[in-house]
Amino acid sequence: MTDWDEMVQYISQAMEAVGEAHEASRTLQQETDRAAFELFRRKMADLEDHLRRLKTVLDNEEAYAVDELMDALSRVYSDRAADYRRTPRMRT
């Protein structure tokens, strides 16, 4: 999977996390108890994590693009990804 595919996946996961957090907020509005509040907090923490990953990529999109290009060239010449990257490999 390329970095571009993973970035698209990060966006999709963030959008899904927004929906889950929104649903948890509705539940919290209807049932104001500890369990609903903990569910809401967990969903918001998940959303924050997804958005943080996405922001890291977007703040460094040029570096990620160059690293992806170097990986592609390395695969052409050596059948493996480049050993050195300026950015971390994105993993979910």
Image (cartoon, grey):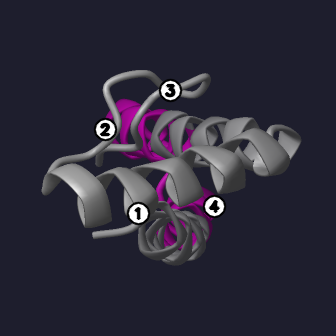
Q: Earlier in the sequence, mark 2 or mark 4?
A: 4
Label drawn at residue 72: 1
Q: Is residue 86 magenta?
A: no
Q: Nearer the viewer, residue 36 or 21?
A: 21
Rounded to the nearest angstrom, the CA distance separating label 4 from label 1 is 49 Å
User: Viewer-nearest of labels 3 and 1?
Assistant: 1
Q: Amino acid at mark 1?
A: Ala
Q: Amino acid at mark 4?
A: Gln
Q: Nearer the viewer, residue 70 or 58?
A: 70
Q: Which residue is mark 2?
A: 35
Q: Earlier in the sequence, mark 3 or mark 1?
A: 1
Q: Is residue 19 above or below residue 13?
A: below
Q: Is residue 86 above or below residue 33?
A: above
**Is label 3 in a helix, a strand or a loop?**
loop
**Is label 4 in a helix, a strand or a loop?**
helix
Rounded to the nearest angstrom, the CA distance separating label 3 from label 1 is 12 Å
Q: Amino acid at mark 3?
A: Arg
Q: Residue at x 51, y 78 (%)?
A: 12
Q: Is residue 21 magenta?
A: yes
Q: Which residue is mark 4?
A: 29
Q: Which residue is mark 3?
A: 85
Q: Which residues are magenta?
A: 20-44
Rounded to the nearest angstrom, the CA distance separating label 3 from label 4 is 46 Å
Label drawn at residue 22: none
Q: Are marks 2 and 1 in contact (CB under 8 Å)?
A: no
